[in-house]
Every structure is written in structure tokens, then in C-alpha cells.
Image (cartoon, helix red, strand yellow):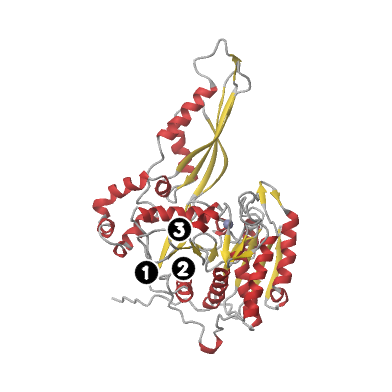
Amino acid sequence: MARAFVCVRVLATVLLLNISIVSRSMGLRGKERQGASRIPSEFSPEERFAMKEALKDAIKIPTVSFGPEEFNTTALAEFGEFIHKAFPNLFKTSFIQHEVVSEYSHLFTVRGSDPSLQPYLLTAHIDVVPAPEEGWEVPPFSGLERDGFIHGRGTLDNKNSLMAILQALELLLTRNYVPRRSFFIALGQDEELSGNYGAQKISALLQARGVQLAFIMDEGGFILDGFFPSLKKPFAMVSVTEKGSLNLKLQVKMTPGHSSAPPAETSIGILAAAVSRLEKTPLPNMFGDGPLKTTLQLLANEFPFPSNMVLNNLWLFGPLVKRLLERNYITNALIRTTTAVTMFHAGIKMNVIPPVAETVINFRIHPAQTVEEVIELVKNNIADDRVQLHVLSAFDPLPISPSDDQAFGYQLLRQTLQSVFPDVSIIAPGVCIGNTDSRHYTNLTTGIYRFNPVYLQPQGFSSIHGLNEKISVQAYETQVKFMFELIQNADTEQRSSPHQHEL
Ligand SMILES: [Zn+2]
């Protein structure tokens, strides 16, 4: 997942610019699961031992996604068998239905006792990115425990989430828990590639069954700890939207000829000029049209002078902030659709004028724009009919999920964060400039929240998709505890606003 990684980097840079996003809404107002029916998140030494061993076993199965259509299907199949053994109650409880989707993905339907409550979905992915052994302190698929950490590919992205969800439910079931609110657990097999076999198929299945969800919780976002010397407390970042994506092939075709008598312009020259125009003319700065401005305004008072003054007076300082955000390549990605030339091909022989030149450009689309709008802007910037545009793949930005007092999923995360992580008083809705499996679920809900309930230090941050990925045993236990609490908290009813301003 380049995804959570990217989300973190974006927020980190915003904070480094001393402009942060802080939410301090009032928390969930629904009644908590009452008194005796509440199951405390306390685990015996045996259970704690078993849960870390299960995570190690999950890491040992190399469920690597290598490239398009290149999966380790043996490992994916083995993983399916593994979860049966590790979590037997999930497969023998009468109110839980288990289905395999696309051969290697899994969908659990957990039927609650109160059908009037809208169900929700917890999702995580089984696959991991490749991890060549060079540079690792311990082999990446060993699942070794050392110095209080479990090492290996997937310990942060994203088998920790997957295992914590299943583990929490398994532990609840052993305590005779029966949920009030129904929920689904979706485990995709190919998030690191596209999610086309996993998340997309599961989503289609749920849609065909007429399911609508109260919210979704997916990966992306962490509790950031120690990234900013000026910030004494760790803070949680919950991503509420993702940028869109467009892969565009630009192609110029010309009559081939001998280089001894060249035409005034070659296919390479025409294409290079078009690329140069695109790089020199960035797509519009959209600060003010996306969620960023509103969030900054809402939360301005959380920050010390002069940031609070600047953010409280965007009518005056807006243009300044807009320009400041452009200066850094990461914050620049927050305020506009980015243009990245990633491939360029032309030429077959030193003395031949090439008939074809082509390039691929990857655009990451700002939440306030669409694929169609970007293509139109690109056409206008190129302003040369000889350059043909071919869309290789594209999807629009994800809708912005609500993070206000009435946003059930967001407030549920907040409530659970406050009880499991009392040190975390700041929750920031973020914009993800990468993508996750959750983009396949937009047809099922308006509330998609990307968050891993794990402290992430700078070292851990660089290990995602990098070297020496690891999670502390304690952090993993806490993640299980978080899910154990969240599942129970979700049994609350969503109460309407307490602010009845009747006139
Ligand atoms: Zn991931």
C-alpha cells in the first residue's frame, strides 16, 4: 500500500507548514452498549500469546502481489486454510456466513439481532507487496519476534488490520457475544494491484443483494507519533477521501523516413513539446474547492499564533496559503491534479525517423475535479491535434465522507479512539493522495473511513513498502482491543442531533 504511506506524508507536510487539520467534534451520542452486556476488552495471557502467534503465522504466508495478474495463488489458498484454523468460531457460528469470492477473497456476513440497524463493513487486504530479502534485518516472511516486535512484510500493511478484525471477533464469540448491528468483513486478495478480483467483486455481490452500509472502515491513516517536534501529542489521521487517477497515453504518428532528409518536426519532437507544455502548465490550483479549506477554517483555533490568525482569516490570507501550499511537492499534490510523465517510448534505429512516439502520463485527480474535466484541460494545454489521447485507465476522485457530529462511522472511530487511546485527543480528517480498496465500495455508502488504529513513528512510516516492516506486540494487541471495542460500540443506535434549534 503506497496508500496510507502517502496519506501520512501529505498530512506530515501540512503540519510542517504549521497548518494542520484538527477535528474536535463532540463524539457519538448514541447510547453505549449498556452495563452488564458490555464485554470488557481484557485478554488472558494465553489469549495474548495466541493472538501474536496467529499474526506471525499470517506473516509467514507470502501472499505477494507481483504485478498485473501475477499473484502467489498458492499462498492465497494457504491463507484461506489458515484463517479457518486460526479463527474456528468464525466458521461455526450460526449467525456468521462465510463466502469465498474470486477464489481467494473472503466475505463474512455477521447477522446482528436488530435488523433495523444499518450494517457496516470492515475491510482489509490479504496481499502484500514483494519484499526481496536484501536489506532486511530478519527475513521478510519469517514472522520472527525480536525485541518486542513481530517482523515481516504485512505487519503494518495490512495483515495487522486483517488479523485484528478476525481476532477481535473470534475473542468476542468465545465470550458469547451476539451483535445487535449486522456487519460484513471483506478480505480482498489484490489490493496492491487493483482490487478488481477482491474488493470489486465483493462490492458487486453486496450491491446485488441490495446492501447499503452505514459506513466502511479500511486501511489508510495512522496515529502519528513523533513526526513533529513541535507537536507534543500523537494525533490520529482518518482519511475521508482519495484522489482520482487517470493514465493517459499520448501518441504521435508520422510517416517514417530516413534521417538524412528529416522533416521539420518528428514524432519525437512534437510529443516532447506537448509533454513540456504539460509540465510547464500545471493543472489549476484548486485550494478552496476541495475539503481542505473548510477543514482548515473550522479548526483554526486549535493552533498557535500566527497559524490560528492566518487560518481564521482566509478571506485575507487565502491567496497566501494557496501559494504556500504550491511550494512543496507534497502539499502541491493536495491542492491540484498532479501531472507525472512516467513512460516515454520512441525510435527503433539511429538513422530512422520514428513513425510513432508515445508517452504515458499519470494524473492524480483533485477531489473537486473529474476525469472528464482533466482530459479537457490536458487537450487545451497541448493544443496540438497531432497528439492523440488514449485513456488507459481512469477513475474519478472518491466522494468526501462526512466527518461532522452526525457522521456515524467517523464518530464511532472517535469514540473508540478516545477509550482505547486516551492520549490521542486530536483526530484529523485527511485526504489520501493514493488509493485503497475502499474505492470499490462507494456504491454502498457515503461514509468511508481509512484508518489503522496503530501508532506510527517515522521509522515505521518508511518501512511500509520498504525495509524492516514490523509492529510491536503491544501495538498489535491494542489494535485487537480497538476492534473488540469498535464492534461493540457499533451496536449503538445513531441518535439524531441534540441541537434542536426550533424557532
Ligand atoms: Zn495496504
Residue position marked by numbered label 1 in the rendering: 24
Mark 2 falls on what kind of element? helix
Label 1 beta carbon less than 8 Å to ligand 1: no
Q: Position of residue 256 (x, y in %)?
A: 60, 17
Closer-to-camera residue (351/495): 351
Q: Is residue 485 above or below residue 189?
A: below
- Give the mark nearest the N terminus, 3 or 1: 1
Select label 3 or label 1 by which is in front: 1
Residue drawn at the location 45% of the way across and 43% of the way down: 338
Give residue 285's quadrant in the image: top left
Q: Is residue 310 left or right of residue 69?
A: left
Q: Quadrant of the C terminus?
A: bottom left
- Give the mark nearest the N terminus, 2 or 3: 3
Residue position marked by numbered label 2 in the rendering: 410
Closer-to-camera residue (159/294): 159
Q: Is residue 331 above or below residue 412?
A: above
Mark 3 falls on what kind of element? loop
* Residue 380 appearing in the image: no
Amino acid type assigned to the residue bearing label 2 in the image = Tyr
State the count of labels.
Answer: 3
* Residue 127 appearing in the image: yes
Residue position marked by numbered label 3 in the rendering: 400
Q: Is residue 347 above or below residue 453?
A: above
Give residue 310's quadrant in the image: bottom left
Q: Quadrant of ligand 1?
A: bottom right
Mark 1 falls on what kind of element? loop
